[in-house]
């Protein structure tokens, strides 16, 4: 399983939005510039996040984007599921009618454990934690967040 580029950029964009002052609208051009993403791709990335209630948009002059939730209440799992749908490592983990072996398949058990562990790791990584860790990493490297 490979996370899509859209999900990767979505995580980066949410971290960037969380680094801004609370309730401050961020211009689309500023997100594009700092995250090195085209306006069209950013629109594609933000649509599912808006639908999921993670980001909100403001139209018109001075419009832009801001977090709709507190960064403490947003996890990497939330972003992944907004962008890609329910986390699944194998079709049998989502559609129990996909394979008739579910009841006795030893691989099914391993898929289930791996999927659960991945969901726990991603679900426990809040955006607040990621912002803090990025700041610490940059300080260690002697750089500032811009």
Image: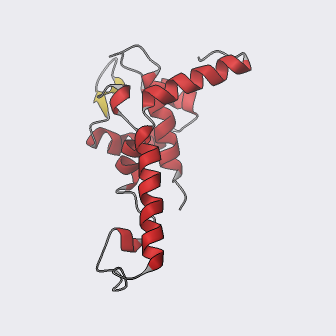
Residue 51 image-quadrant placement:
top left
* Color encoding of the figure: secondary structure
Q: In screen coordinates, is 48 left or right of 16?
A: left
Question: Residue drawn 37% across and 85% down?
Answer: 101
Total of numbered circles in the picture? Answer: 0
Note whether 58 is above or below 12 in the view shown. Answer: above
Note whether 96 is above or below 63 in the view shown. Answer: below
Question: Residue drawn 51% across and 25% down?
Answer: 131
Residue reaching furthest to the right: 141
Quadrant where the image shows the C terminus: top right
Residue 39 appears in view: no
Q: Nearer the viewer, residue 10 or 2?
A: 2
Q: Nearer the viewer, residue 88 or 83?
A: 88
Question: Residue drawn 39% across and 72% down?
Answer: 91
> Horizontal and vertical percent for residue 55?
33, 33
Question: Residue drawn 65% across and 24% down?
Answer: 137
> Horizontal and vertical percent for residue 44?
41, 45
Residue 143 image-quadrant placement:
top right
Q: In screen coordinates, is 17 left or right of 52?
A: right
């Amino acid at each position: 399983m490979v996370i899509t580029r859209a999900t990767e950029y979505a995580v980066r964009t949410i971290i960037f939005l969380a680094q801004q002052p609370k309730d401050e609208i961020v211009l689309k051009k500023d997100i594009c510039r700092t995250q090195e993403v085209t306006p069209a791709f950013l629109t594609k990335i933000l649509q599912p996040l808006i639908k999921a209630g993670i980001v909100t948009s403001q139209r018109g002059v001075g419009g832009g984007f801001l977090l709709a939730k507190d960064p403490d209440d947003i996890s990497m799992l939330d972003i992944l599921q907004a962008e890609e749908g329910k986390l699944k490592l194998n079709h049998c983990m989502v559609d129990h009618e996909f394979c008739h072996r579910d009841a006795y398949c030893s691989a099914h058990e391993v898929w289930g454990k791996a999927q659960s562990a991945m969901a726990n790791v991603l679900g426990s990584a809040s955006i607040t934690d990621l912002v803090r860790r990025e700041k610490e990493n940059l300080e260690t490297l002697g750089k500032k967040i811009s």
